[in-house]
Each structure stands twice: as C-alpha cells, then as structure tokens.
C-alpha cells in the first residue's frame, strides 16, 4: 500500500507551506542532482548561483555570497561556525554568542556542536531583544551577536541596526536570522536587511514563505571571505574545496528555490504577504472578540492565551496547532491558511471552550 503525505488542510502551526507549482515541477526535474559536487553537476551549480543572487536581491545585498542550505538550522550553525573561526583568529579561545531569548533553538545545537558559549539576553514586553541587556552582555570574548527578523513564536523584528552597531563596536560579527521573515519583510517598513544595517550574515529560507520545496534554506554573507572560514579540501571530487556543512545536497531544493522566486518576486510575494497579514489581523480580532488576550500580529503570526483544555480540544478536532514557550496558542498565517480555514477554526474554538484567559502583553 502506498503511503500519502499529510495535507495542509488543518495545519496552522507550520512555517512551511505547499510549494508553488513551478517550484514543485523544478524540484522533480532536479531530484537526482547534487550541488555539493558542482564539477559533476554544473547546471544545478549555476542555479545555486542564481538562487544566491535572488536572495541577495530580497535582502538588499548587491554582491551576495552564500549557498542554499538544508534549512535555517544549518544556516544558523554555519554562521556561528564562521564567527568562531574569526574569533579564534583574533586569539579568543572561548568565544561566546550573544542572542535574545526569542532566538531559534538551532543556536543551542550550534553551541553544542561547536563548543561555544551562549549568552541569552531577555526580550522586552513587545518580545523584542532589550538593547541594554545586549550592551551589558557583549565583551571582548563575544564572537557573534544575533538578531531575529521574524521570530518563531511572535513574528517580531529586533532593532537590527542598533544590534549591528553594538556587535561591530566589540569586533564581533553580526548575524540576522530572517529564516521565516525574509520573504515578508521586504513589503513592510521594518529595518532588517543588509541595506539597513552592518549585517555580516543572514539566514533566509526559500522553503518557508518563499514557497520552494523542502529542503531549501539559505545562508547569505556580505563578504565572500567569510565563507573561507568554512572551506575544507575535497580532493576526490572534481571541485577541490567545499564551504557547505552537508556534502551531498539537494538539487531539488536549489532548482525549486530559483523557480519560486523568479515566479513570485516581487509582486506575487507582495500579494501573498498582504493576504497573510490581513488573515492574521482578522484572526486576532476574532480571538479578541471571543475574550482572549492576543499578541498584536506585526507579521502574519498570531499568539493568544487559549488555555490548555481548549487547546487540546482544538487538537482533538484535527487542528495542527502549537504553543509558544509561555503557553500561548500560536497560529502562523502561511499561504495555505485561507480565511475560510481560519473561520472554521474560530467556529471550533468558540464551540470547544471554555475560556480562562491569562494576560499577554501587546507589542510596543
């Protein structure tokens, strides 16, 4: 019996979505290619160069370098690895990474793998990193400062220019995690990219809001010399050096990223963002009408204080939902999340009840 994958019909918590048809077609055509061996697979290697060029356009980086990674976790690990090597070259034996409590859990993986220390600083009532806490945390041992542009739990954007200035004042590198936010932030007035701040590296994932097939993450660097910190010799391949974390990589992800971005950038993504943001604001208003305290959706992500018994009741109805670390219901308004689906969700929420809301702070 042939198994079939789960559909997206009731998935409200994922930051991935259905690939665009052009991305699906490209992924299928390039399934058997490996951009990790560009000498053998030059067509997909050229496509990866194009993907990096397109990602640079989204992130306002005129001469981008980087590669298509397996996802945000790999890109974040690689950013920490670059910073560790640069710190060691400066004579720092025990480098640290300063990051907000809103940062993705992949940085904990990076710390374990790379033997660096994390200094986690608090966020404010609006779920953005506190700059005073960052200033207090950075010192001569700091290798990297991390800012988040579209946080996983609340969709918040840290004060990126100020964080970059702090990092560079101490000789540290500055990394922005825009894995999810990178494909919606170009259509807002938020400051988040290479053109706004002295960003050294960025995570930006086509397989999230970019509508590429999984796996298609992205790592961008301002200066291609940063990739030299990652390079290893590959004497038995046609290409003799490799800066990626994985050896064999997905040509399907590379090709689908190019296909999706060339199809949707910029007008398709702009319309997609507008729909998603309108859906998030509609959902936030309906949840508020039902008596729940809601975190204001500055990007297409809604968090509300739905209690545990109601949350489990919604799961029993088949809704694929998740919670923030503080316990709020979390709904990501991805392209597959339509107004009709949200209306059905709200109807089920009203029927499941009861409510025992807890206060949740709004954004600043």
Image: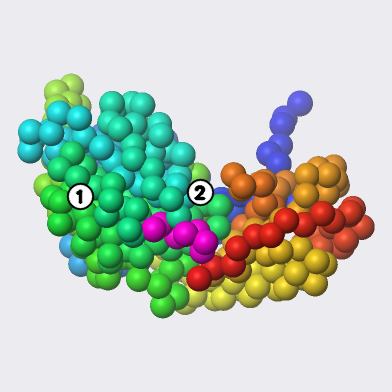
Graded by Cα atoms within 10 Å as few (under 14), some (14 to 19) or many (20 or more), the crowding at tag 1 reads many
* Front residue of 126 and 301: 126
- Indicate whether residue 94 is drawn in magenta: no
Instruction: Using residue 259 as the reference point, say whether residue 295 is left or right of it.
Output: right
Q: Quadrant of the N terminus?
A: top right
- For the rendered model, the colour scheme is rainbow
Q: Report the residue at 68% width, 64% height from top.
A: 294
Q: Report the residue at 35% width, 71% height from top.
A: 191
Q: Report the residue at 59% width, 67% height from top.
A: 362
Residue 309 lies, with reference to residue 180, above or below; the image says above
Question: Percent position (x, y) of residue 173?
Answer: 20, 49
Question: Percent position (x, y) of residue 179?
Answer: 43, 53
Residue 283 lies, with reference to residue 10, above or below; the image says below
Question: Percent position (x, y) of residue 234?
Answer: 17, 26
Q: How far apart, in angstroms, are the residues tagged by discs 1 and 2?
A: 31 Å
* SS at circle 1: strand
Magenta span: predominant SS is loop
Identify residue for label 1: 173
Identify residue for label 2: 213
Mark 1 or mark 2, earlier in chain: 1
Asked whether residue 102 appears in the rendered view, the answer is yes
* SS at circle 2: loop
Q: Which mark is residue 322?
A: none
The residue sitting at the left extreme is 90
Q: Splitting the image into 4 quarters, where does residue 93 fall?
A: top left
Magenta-colored span? 124-130
Q: Splitting the image into 4 quarters, where does residue 266 fall?
A: bottom left
């Amino acid at each position: 019996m042939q198994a079939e994958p789960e559909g997206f019909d009731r998935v409200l918590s994922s930051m991935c979505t259905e690939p665009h048809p052009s991305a699906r077609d490209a992924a299928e055509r390039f399934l058997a290619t490996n951009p990790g061996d560009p000498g053998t697979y030059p067509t997909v290697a050229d496509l990866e160069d194009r993907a990096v060029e397109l990602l640079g356009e989204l992130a306002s980086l005129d001469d981008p370098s980087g590669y298509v990674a397996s996802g945000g976790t790999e890109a974040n690990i690689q950013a920490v690895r670059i910073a560790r090597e640069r710190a060691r070259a400066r004579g720092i034996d025990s480098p640290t990474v300063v990051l907000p409590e809103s940062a993705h859990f992949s940085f904990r993986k990076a710390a374990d793998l790379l033997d660096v220390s994390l200094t986690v600083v608090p966020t404010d009532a609006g779920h953005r990193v506190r700059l005073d806490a960052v200033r207090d945390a950075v010192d001569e041992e700091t290798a990297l400062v991390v800012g988040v542009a579209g946080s996983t739990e609340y969709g918040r954007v840290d004060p990126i220019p100020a964080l970059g200035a702090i990092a560079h004042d101490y000789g540290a590198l500055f990394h922005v995690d825009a894995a999810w936010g990178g494909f919606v932030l170009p259509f807002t007035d938020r400051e988040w990219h290479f053109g706004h701040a002295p960003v050294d590296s960025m995570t930006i994932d086509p397989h999230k809001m970019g509508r590429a097939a999984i796996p298609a993450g992205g790592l961008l660097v301002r200066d291609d010399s940063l990739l030299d910190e990652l390079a290893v010799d590959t004497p038995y391949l046609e290409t003799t050096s490799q800066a990626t974390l994985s050896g064999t990589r997905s040509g399907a992800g590379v090709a689908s990223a190019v296909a999706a971005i060339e199809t949707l950038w910029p007008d398709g993504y702009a319309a997609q963002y507008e729909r998603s943001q309108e859906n998030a604001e509609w959902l936030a208003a309906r949840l508020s009408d039902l008596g729940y305290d809601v975190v204001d959706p500055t990007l297409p992500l809604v968090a509300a204080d739905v209690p545990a018994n109601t949350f489990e009741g919604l799961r029993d109805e088949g809704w694929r939902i998740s919670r923030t670390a503080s316990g709020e219901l979390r709904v990501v308004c991805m392209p597959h999340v339509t107004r009709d689906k949200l209306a059905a969700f709200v109807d089920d929420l009203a029927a499941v009840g009861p409510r025992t809301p807890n206060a949740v702070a709004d954004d600043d």
